[in-house]
Image (spheres, rainbow, N blue to C red):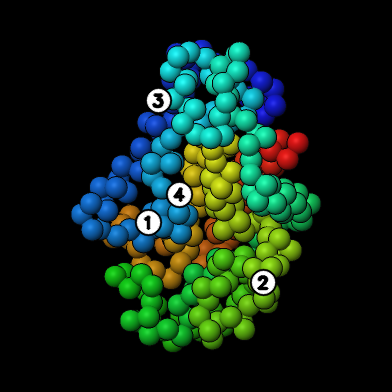
Amino acid sequence: MLIGAGETLAEAEWRARQRAHDARVRAWTDPHQARAEHGEKHPVYDFLFSYYAFRVAWLRRWHPGPDVALAGEGAREFLRWPEYRETSDGVTIDCAKLPAHRRAFVAWLRDSLEAMQTRPPFFGCAGLHEWAMVYRQTPAEVRHNAYSLRFAPDELARIVESQPVCCSHFDAFRFFTAPAAPLNKLQPTRATTSQFEQRGCLHANMDLYKWAFKLAPFTPSELIADCFALARDIREIDMRASPYDLRALGFSPIAIETPFGRAEYEQHQRAFATRGEPLRVRLLAMCQRLLA
């Protein structure tokens, strides 16, 4: 459904969408919760629930998004959220209830997404950000030190130093080690995030999930789930291209230290940029609807 088109869902319809969303999301959240109950850590998938701090219960919760009226007596359960109101057609979310302080964020996000639409994507970073995060560290300092690195520290450093480091994403760059930061061609800051963000970046496409849930409960939950699915696939590639040896978890390395591996990584970058494009368009439409 196009945002702004308007539709009324019978209770049987929206209940079916609610159940379908829950089933889809639980395929991701149930394993995560089972690991958490046993105190198990996962270097790939935990990131989606720790760095992206959207609670499992919130991810499972279904919201229809703007311009959808939910018919039936059961729809009144949505009135527990202050963003909803009851109309003659049913219960619907009211975009006018977006608080003023959130409007400023939505306007920033709209401008950022629009800028990304016009900025050409860059596919030449070779995924060196994860390498820069362990550059010149001792084994005890390495973040995922339960898993070995594929190279000894000196060889890992040589690999980083032998290639141009050009990370455009501040939230990756800020985790570079102190010796690695000066090696980066770009020096993004929090304030200049919108100036550097570009569609070829794996992390910029992962962050579509962050922007989707930050607009909740106005965001249709199907859009949040679509963005999560993309972020999950990207995270797998991100860590396969990292210096960590995760073969014991079923993740074969993408050897970005070789020309073949860098070409493979770029293929994934391009595919993710293509997948992210319609999601970015939907998020931009959400921002415009909320600011209308």
The mark lying in front, picked from 1 and 3, is: 3
Residue flagged by tag 2: what amino acid is it? Answer: Pro
Q: Is residue 94 above or below residue 155?
A: above
**Considering only order in the chain, which callout, 3 or 4, is on the residue closer to the N terminus?**
3
What separation in Å lies between label 4 and label 3 (alpha carbons)? 20 Å
**Considering only order in the chain, which callout, 1 or 4, is on the residue closer to the N terminus?**
1
Name the spot of residue 189 as percent of width and height, x first: 66, 71
| Residue furthest left as drawn | 38
**What residue sits 53% from the left and 76% below the top?**
176
Q: Which residue is mark 3?
A: 19
What separation in Å lies between label 2 and label 4 (alpha carbons)? 25 Å
Q: Which residue is mark 4?
A: 54
Labels 2 and 4 touching (C-beta < 8 A): no
Residue 158: image tag? none
Density class for disc 4 (Cα within 10 Å; few <14, some 14-19, many ≥20) is: some
What separation in Å lies between label 3 and label 2 (alpha carbons)? 42 Å
Residue flagged by tag 4: what amino acid is it? Answer: Phe
Density class for disc 1 (Cα within 10 Å; few <14, some 14-19, many ≥20) is: some
**Considering only order in the chain, which callout, 4 or 2, is on the residue closer to the N terminus?**
4
Residue 188: image tag? 2
